[in-house]
Amino acid sequence: MIYREAGQIKTTYRADMAIFPITQDRIGFMIIMAVAIVAIPTLASTYVLEAFMIPFLIWGLAAMSLNIMLGYAGQLSLGHGGFMAVGAYAAYNFATRIPDLNLIVCFLLAGLVTAAVGVFFGLPSLRIKGFYLAVATLAAQFIIEFVISSFPWFAGDNMMGAVDTPAIVLFGWQVDETVERYYFVLGFVVVLTLLCKNMVRSSIGRSWMAIRDMDVAAEVIGIRPLQTKLIAFGVSSFLAGIAGALYAFVYLKACDITSFDLFQSFNILFMVILGGLGSLMGSYLGAAFVMMLPIVLNLLTTTFLGGTGHSDFIANAEHMVYGGLIMFFLIVEPYGLARMWTTTKEKLRLWPFPH
Amino acid sequence: MSARKLGLALLAAGIMAGTLSGTALAADKSDPNKEQFVPVLVYRTGPFAAGGTGMPGGLLDYFALLNQRDGGINGIKLVWEECDTGYKTDRGVECYERLKAKGAKGAPFFLPMSTGVAYAVMERAHKDKIPNVQIGYGRTDSSDGRVFKYSFPMLTNYWSQSSAKLTYIAGRMGGHDKLKGAKIVNLHLKHPYGEETRPVWDKMAAKYGFQVTHIPVPWPGIDQKSLWLQIRKIKPDFVINRNWGVSCTVPLREAARIGFPRDRIIGVWWCGAEEDAIPAGKAAVGYITAEFVKIGQDVPVIQEIFEHVYGNMKGNLSAARVGSVFHNRGVVWGIVMTEAIRLAHTKFGVGPMSGEQMQWALENLKIDAARIDELGATGLVPEVSMSCFDHEGGGRVRFKQWDGKKWNMITDWVNSDESLVREMIEASAAKYAKEKGIAPRDCPPTGRFAKN
Amino acid sequence: MSENKPLVAVNNIEVIYDHVILVLRGVSLEVPEGGIVALLGANGAGKTTTLKAVSKLLQSERGEVTKGQIEFKGQDTKSLVPNQMVSRGLIQVMEGRHCFEHLSIEENLLTGAYTNKGGRQKIRDQLELVYSYFPGLKERRSSLAGYISGGEQQMTAIGRALMATPSLILLDEPSMGLAPQLVEEIFEIVKRLNTEEGVSFLLAEQNVTMALRYADYGYILENGRVVMDGEAATLADNEDVKEFYLGLGGGERRSYRDVKHYRRRKRWLA
Amino acid sequence: MDVVFFFEVLISGMLSGVMYSLVALGFVLIYKASGVFNFAQGAMVLLAALTFVRFLEMGLPIWLALSLTLLVMVVLAVLIEKLVLSHLVNQPLIILFMATIGLNFFLEGLAQGVWDSQVHGLDLGIEDVPLAAVEEVTGMFISVFDVVAAVIAGSLVLVLSIVFHKTKVGRALRAVSDDHQAAMSVGIPLDRLWAIVWAIAGVVALVAGALWGQRLGVQFSLSIIALKALPVLILGGFNSILGAIVAGLLIGSGEKLAEVFLGPYVGGGIEAFFPYVLAMLILFIRPEGLFGDKIIERV
């Protein structure tokens, strides 16, 4: 009886259209926010914030950006690492070349630049589909890497190739301490996630899903495929660009093209699939899994086997466990961690009388 | 169903244990005031594992030797914790955050083990006051210690190396004046690390009147046929091999295919390990690379490691790798870092050192020939003379050649073109200082830069 | 029910998907040797699930038979996998045909002979037999199955099943998306196969009129339960069936209270 | 322009391309049999080559090392089928794709964990030197090794094409890739077929691994070659064995010509993305690749 929508009667349209129509979900959301805003910063160590929470939020945002494209609009992209790079370098250039530009504006501009790039590389999506579309986005990945590394202008004509990002200053407030940087990222993530949540429930979200499920049929009922797909590319790469800027400015504190290579694109894809296609929450669950699990495995071996004299085999065993767990989770629940959550809710709804 | 629950439980347990382990490890049994904690980054898996095990292996072998033979440094035992980055920058940052506060006084210094990690922790290390030490790699312009207080690209940096290579090439051609009209191809990885030496080659080409062609190798560089077809058209006198991992080996094969002499390929030291030459087989014979240590087992300190460390089954590598390129570099790192700890003890008293104290020690470190002999490291380590002005403290390079079985040292220490390199470093560092709003410290030129 | 020993006996099975969704509860049915049995019901009543439970295809859909048992030729099928069912003579033609789009019609048919151990000549003979029932397919034998019409695909699918020389074919919604004439044609062929080749059929259909015309016996499924069964003729005569499945309500509307009365009656029997 | 040089670039490019085709072939096999893009193919190349070279280093004669490695790959295929794939039958293809990513990590760890992460030299006894005759007549440098590799790749393609298009098992495999469940419904034993095809893919991986291993040394980087095989795969069509080889020739020659003749004008290194651009351009004309099965869309 803990989780049940029965008895929650919606009396207004507003209530019916709320983001969290079920009270328990609403309470759940409040709890998550309370934990994220109050509990984590006060309880977690600097290490946990720096090494887990900040990158987790950024990767969650990146995964959400791909999930919008893949999970909602059905367009596979292996270029999101490249889009993040565009965002990072765009933000770097805005921040260093236009003095006194508010950093939030700067990030948003970077997002827009990335969106433009994303839309450009999304053009082939009208004709090319599925895994074949992946090639277009792979080309995007490599072309972006090539352009950024070929023209030193992007890296501020720096002889070193990699560049440090400027300090984050907002209205005279220097975002420098770990907790401050955590809030900075959290702010972006919460606002953008709520916006996305609303977007996927709106008519654009529905037309994405229609395109995903059967684009020819969607076209027949009056959805313009190219426009819809391009909006998905645009929104998705906008988010990816912001995630990239956050990654460079807040996490790495450096712009280095090698941090946005193909493997990061793959990682984002893993997060989306493991988290659950077409679930915003799944993006974050997936990000947690893909980003944190290897570190946790590593910490576990360090804890239990001591921090010295690891054999190569143990390092490789971590890979094996990680790969094994991916397969294990897929076998147990192919539709991702988010679906696991839904199934659990289903069980709670029936509890204590299953059938 | 039970399997699913088990999975979730495992995940939950994993995350719990992960977050808790930070505290769990701090509670060590032995007296923390008698120990010097050192963070050690490794990468045991992936395409660069040869270096990622070899160098930490040598470093730890030397630490083990000191613990075993001398009972540590002035009675302070060295203890360490490894962290595997897999050669990924983000994991490197995680490792930095994980290890920076361990030990009695936190990490005394940090060896990032990759250029990407070196960049990513540059600012963090500065803020945390932990010296970021990159020996033989890293951010070249941080040799200007006035701007980069906590970054130490020690022994020699890439620009020094490139100028030393030119000195070597000039020697082969019969003097710097013979360089005029010569052709050199700079075959480099298309990657910030690979591109970093382009400006110095351009500058030297202008100075000495030779022609340099930069040919970027697209990652991962497993097939460089088209590049070598271009090289064949150019007919260069020398080819610089500035790659990393497998892309170091491929040029040797390609050169053999078109009959380009291998002793005219001069590799960066990161293309100069056994692991780079062996896979090329016969194609590698004659290949020459730069080096900043001495290779082989015929050094007393390496012998001692063999005896004390491997003799007591405390070795960190398979015994066959002792004396190999990566291992000896690791030993040299160990020597340099422990000498700095020793120096710190003389000023701050015997005990675990903090990052700030090590910053002082590294800036004042001098290892002269007499001390090197005393350490049993004659020829293994170049002389070091650090200062606030000069965070490189050396800049000398040796060259070695592959004979099909092993590396043979073919030159003694070759000097770099100090004034040319220093000028570029200062320009780049000044730009950084301006961007970051750092006021450079006021330090007088010292050692090799002192104006007499 | 016929006197013969049943070919398939489904005994009180319960099917759960994904560990949570209960789809079938206590379904029992029998298919006699040489019979055509119809399984009737609306969308989502559980017809397809029943067929897949029998053919063992359920395994690949995260579904699970949690209670009851299924016997084929007197043998419990619990531990068998689909290809074992096929080689024992039970094959399913899935809803929506499921032809192999990138294979030609003939290649499609030949895949059906995968378990046919009779050798090359036997397979050729069987192929000719199939073509004799579906002459249209022979003409288009080299066309890709993805490009042929729905009716041809349905024929290909049935022909493909025949290639395995089955004794029982589970036929799921053969009428789906086809023109009435084509449906009629296909049912005629089914009937001929039944009488001439002695193949038994278990037929899941929404088109109750058609199914009851050709079947000997019928079961009506609702919400995962068998609510009614009987000889085809009896069912076709039943007032409720007429009203709700055949659309032959007698003139005036009845009150809502009467609508589900047979359900009430049947609830205690299920 | 120097004509001889042009042809030299063209021919050596084609020979390079064939080396990519060898790797692409492994992908094609598994795609053809299950519709799955096998991300772990690169790891399989690594595992096969590493196993082979370590057996050789133990002092086994080459035929024994080869047979033992083959055995390992077959056992591996059976295990993969039993433990992973059989549980994922009929799931969306992206899920199976994801599972192969997990498998990729697992195999990378396994290969390096059981053997090691060091670099091993491998000498198959095929000389990697210019063909003297060709050099004398034309002035072109064409390596013996490349020609041998091309011949091996060609024969593999021939044999596999026959298997897929002329045999019962081949037909069944193509049926499986179209529709898992329908294949099961007509009595095709998915488990056995998948084990077979993964075993064949393992064998192809061994061939690719050994040839690449001689050139690069047997080391982790072998798994990265998969990346170069990707555009070949896409251009040729995921399920065309012939396509893999033709696309290899096209991509190889295309990227070399581009790098040599266009590269210097844009800073060089365009080989990294040029194959993808080439593949993309051709996909505009044929969205299913040059030789891939037509994409059939019905509403």
Image (cartoon, coloured by chain):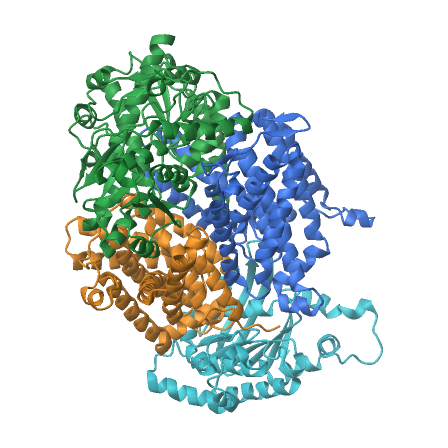
Chain colours: A blue, B green, C cyan, D orange
Q: Position of residue B315 (x, y in %)?
A: 23, 29
In the rendered picture of this protein, how many numbered marks are placed on residues?
0
Q: Is residue C257 visible?
A: yes
Q: Is residue B420 left or right of residue C44?
A: left
**In the rendering, at what x and y percent does residue A344 appear?**
59, 47
In the drawing, does residue C26 fall left or right of residue B407? right
Q: Quadrant of residue C165?
A: bottom left
Q: Position of residue B162 (x, y in %)?
A: 33, 36
Above or below for D284 versus D69: below
In front here: B355 or A97?
Answer: A97
Residue placed most toward the observer, A295 or C61: A295
At 31% from the left edge and 38% from the top edge, which residue is drawn?
B270
Compared with residue B428, is residue C128 higher up or lower down, i.e. above or below?
Answer: below
Q: Is residue C94 above or below residue D204?
A: below
Position in image of residue B254 (x %, y %): 27, 53
Specify whether D140 is left or right of B306: right
Q: Is residue C85 visible?
A: no
State the residue at coordinates (40%, 59%).
D261
The answer to which image quadrant residue D127 occupies is bottom left
Image quarter in which the N terminus of chain A is found: top right
Above or below — where is D111 with respect to D24?
Answer: above
The residue closer to the viewer here, A200 or A99, is A99
Residue nearest the viewer, comparing C165 with C222:
C165
